[in-house]
Amino acid sequence: MASHDTLGDARRLGFALPLDDQLWLRLTERHHADTLFERIEAESGHLAGAFVWAKNPTSESIQARVDAALQQFRRGEGWHAELLLDDEPIGALWLHDLQGPGGSTEIGYWLGREWQGRGLLTRALEGLHRHFFEGRGLGRVSIAVDPRNARSKAVPERLGYEPEAVLRNAYPAPDGGPGHLAFYGILREGWEARPRPAQRAPLPLPRFALRVDDELELGLLERGDVPALAALVDAEREHLRPWMPWAGDLSEGATRGFVEGRALPAIAEADGFEAGIWWRGRLVGACGLHTLYREPMRGSLGYWLAADAQGHGIVTRAMTAVTAKAFDDLGFERVDLRTDVGNARSRAVAERLGFTFEGVLRRELWNGQAFADAAVYALLRSDWEALREAGTVP
C-alpha cells in the first residue's frame, strides 16, 4: 500500500481518476459535501457570476447537489468530482450527461480564483479527453458557456472545440433572467487530428479507483464491467464454489443484477462500496466494504481473487487500502472480516492485517451446501491507529 509520504490522503483514500502526473479527479462522495460547501462558500463571490447555485449556497443545497450527482453516477449518466493539484482541491468538474461508446457527454467546471491563469483547466480537460475518447470510446464532448463570458468561451476554443449552437433563454442566468447557452463541441476525429502535448503519465483505466500502488487499483464497478466480471467468475467457478455460494450460478444477468442492485446503489447511498481488483491492468477479483451499521460506524470486509493471481500479496494490499478508507476517510470505529473456519487462506489474510481473532459464530455462513461456522476477526480504530503509529500497517 502507498504510504502517507508517497500519496496524499485525498487521492489515497478517495476514488480517484488521474489526468496527468499532478492533476487528479476525486469522485465526490456524500461525506465530502461539507468540505465542498466550505470551498464553494469561500469562492462564492468568484462563482456567483457564472452559476446560480453559487449565489447563496448552503450546506443543504450543496449536499443536495452531491446526492443528485451520485444518483447520476448510479444511473451511469455522469458524475461530480473535485479537481486536485497533487493533493490540494482547486476546483471541480462534472458531467451533465454521459453516453456509451460513440455517444457524447457535456462537461461543466469551475476553478478557484487563485488557480486561474496557469493552464490547469486546459491540462485537466486534455487529460479527461483521453479518458473519454481512448478509454470510453465517446464520439463527442461538449461544453456550454454563457456567450457573454469571454473567459469561459476561451477554454473550449483553446482546446479546439468548434462553435455548434446558441440556445436562447435556455437556463436561469445568475442575474435572475433567462440566459443563453453557447455550445462548443469536439468530435473524436477532430481530437485525434489535433497536435497534443506529450503525455505526462500513461493512460490508466477510465474509472474512479482507490490507487493502491503502481500495479494495483480497486475500481468502482460500473455497468460496462459486467461482461468481464461475469466471464472471470465463470472461469473461477470451481475455485470459488467452496467459499462463495453465489459462484455456482452467477450468470451475466445475475452479475448485472449485482452491479445495478448493489454496487452502484452502495456508492450512491453511502452504504459501503464494491470494487473490482485490477492488477497490472487485468481484472483478477473483487472486494468491498459492506454490512454497514451507523452507531457506531462499523462494517465488514469482503473479497475474492482469481486462483492465478494468488501469491502476490494482492489481497493484503487491497484489504489494507479498504481498511484505510474505512477508518481514515469514512470514520469507522470497527472493521471485521468473517470467513469460514476452514478457509485457512482468508484467516491468514486477517492475521497479516493485524486483526484480532474474536471467536467463532456457529452456523453463521451458508456455503451453498450447508451452514458453516464463521471465524470472526476485527480491527478497532484504536488498533488501526496503533499499527499506523508503529509503522506496521502492511
Image: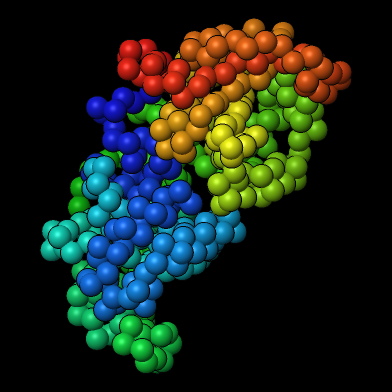
> Who is closer to the viewer here, 144 or 309?
144
In the image, residue 216 above or below residue 135: above
Where does residue 47 sit, x and y in percent of width and height? Answer: 27, 71
Q: Residue at x 42, y 55 (%)?
A: 33
Whether residue 235 is visible: yes
Where does residue 354 sit, x and y in percent of width and height? Answer: 48, 12
Which quadrant of the structure image shows residue 184?
A: bottom left
Q: Residue at x 59, y 23 (%)?
A: 336
Which quadrant of the structure image shows residue 90?
A: bottom left
Judge left or right: residue 243 versus residue 143. Answer: right
Judge left or right: residue 150 versus residue 251. Answer: left
In the image, residue 323 above or below residue 166: above
Judge left or right: residue 60 versus residue 245. Answer: left
In this rendering, the count of numbered labels is 0
In the image, residue 316 above or below residue 218: above
In the rendered view of the protein, which quadrant contains the N terminus? top left
Judge left or right: residue 137 versus residue 235. Answer: left
> Who is closer to the viewer here, 63 or 154?
63
Where does residue 5 sit, x and y in percent of width and height? Answer: 24, 27
In the image, residue 317 above or below residue 167: above
Q: Residue at x 27, y 51 (%)?
A: 89
Where does residue 23 sit, x and y in percent of width and height? Answer: 26, 48
> Who is closer to the viewer here, 292 or 295?
295
The residue sitting at the left extreme is 117
Which quadrant of the structure image shows residue 58?
A: bottom left
The residue sitting at the right extreme is 370
In the rendered view of the protein, which quadrant contains the C terminus? top left
> Who is closer to the viewer here, 236 or 277?
277
